Amino acid sequence: MADEFRQLLEATLRHLEALKEHGARFVPVSPQTLEALARPPALATSAQPAPQVSTPPMPIAPPPRQPRADTMTTPRPVDPVPSRTATPKAKALSELRERALACTRCPNLVKFRTQVVFGVGNPDAELMFVGEAPGADEDAQGEPFVGRAGQLLTKIIETMGLSRDRVYIGNILKCRPDMPASEPGNRKPTPEEMQTCIPWLLDQIEIIRPKVMVALGATAMEGLLGGKPAISHLRGRWHEFKGIPLMPTFHPSYVLRGNDIHKKRQVWEDMLQVMEKLGRPISAKQRNYFLKGGS
Ligand code: SF4
């Protein structure tokens, strides 16, 4: 019986490894199964009936870090479940991520950060968004653009007919810029910090090779192309980064300030250009968002 149990266990482990290899992050397991698995093997091999397999899902990979209560926003999946087989790009990105998560190039940021915020999305994405750096929410959750600005970015992506797990989202800086304990909020990364961290982003871009990139805000443009650009002068026009068409637009947090419909329309016009460049269909309704008479 012990041999049969060991064989069964090994077969189960092989099956779970194969599922994980193919991108699965959860399998359905009943509470009874979890209870049985927690028992010593001798008990598990007794003549009890095999536990029923049903919901809820049990993570194969370690569960995502829980957000702190003071930074929690609306409930959302921390890491979208990939539905496709792992591609060479996914493997390369995953290896890069492992190395980036252990990065200690900036001692002050290493001391301050909760974790490295590598990036999120589809390794085979045609569209890549680049922001400046993680803020408090992103540092807590380990994912870029998850605070209020992130929710607006998600809305923009969905209005384009896409979803967060079909695009890729990364930042110039992978660790939250440190702040004095007495000061709330986030700060802009320094040029030195951006220069130190940019190789990670360059490697991400090299692996993903998106068809189009969008720079969110002036700091993202500064990190990519250098200089001290005024985003209001740069946005709405195509630039190029490493041979990839690059569209700068306002950072979502700037758009949130003042709730200005004119700014929203400007960002939306930039995204219409991105959709055209990607060859995506655009409905009349989409064309008219944030115009008089539009939605
Ligand atoms: S900011 Fe970038 S370079 Fe600096 S420690 Fe974090 S990951 Fe490393």
Image: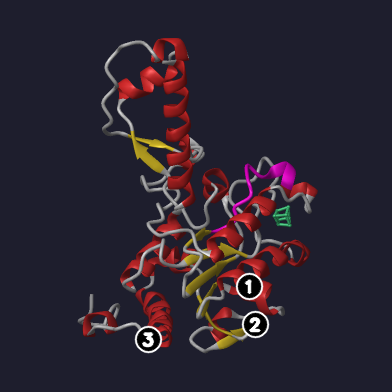
Mark 3 and 1 residues: CB-CB less than 8 Å, in contact? no
Quarter of image, ligand 1: bottom right
The residue nearer to you, when weighing 236 against 105, is: 105
Amino acid identity at mark 1: Glu
**Residue 137, percent across and down?**
52, 48
**Whole-Å distance between the Cαs marked 3 and 1?**
22 Å
Mark 3 and 2 residues: CB-CB less than 8 Å, in contact? no
Residue at horizontal 37%, vertical 69%? Answer: 156
Pick out the residue farthest to the left.
293
**Residue 190, percent across and down?**
73, 63
Mark 1 and 2 residues: CB-CB less than 8 Å, in contact? yes
The residue beneath circle 2 is 242
**Residue 78, percent across and down?**
44, 48
* Magenta-drawn segment: 110-119
The residue nearer to you, when weighing 228 against 6, is: 6
Marker disc for residue 206 = 1
Residue at horizontal 50%, vertical 80%? Answer: 212
The residue beneath circle 3 is 279
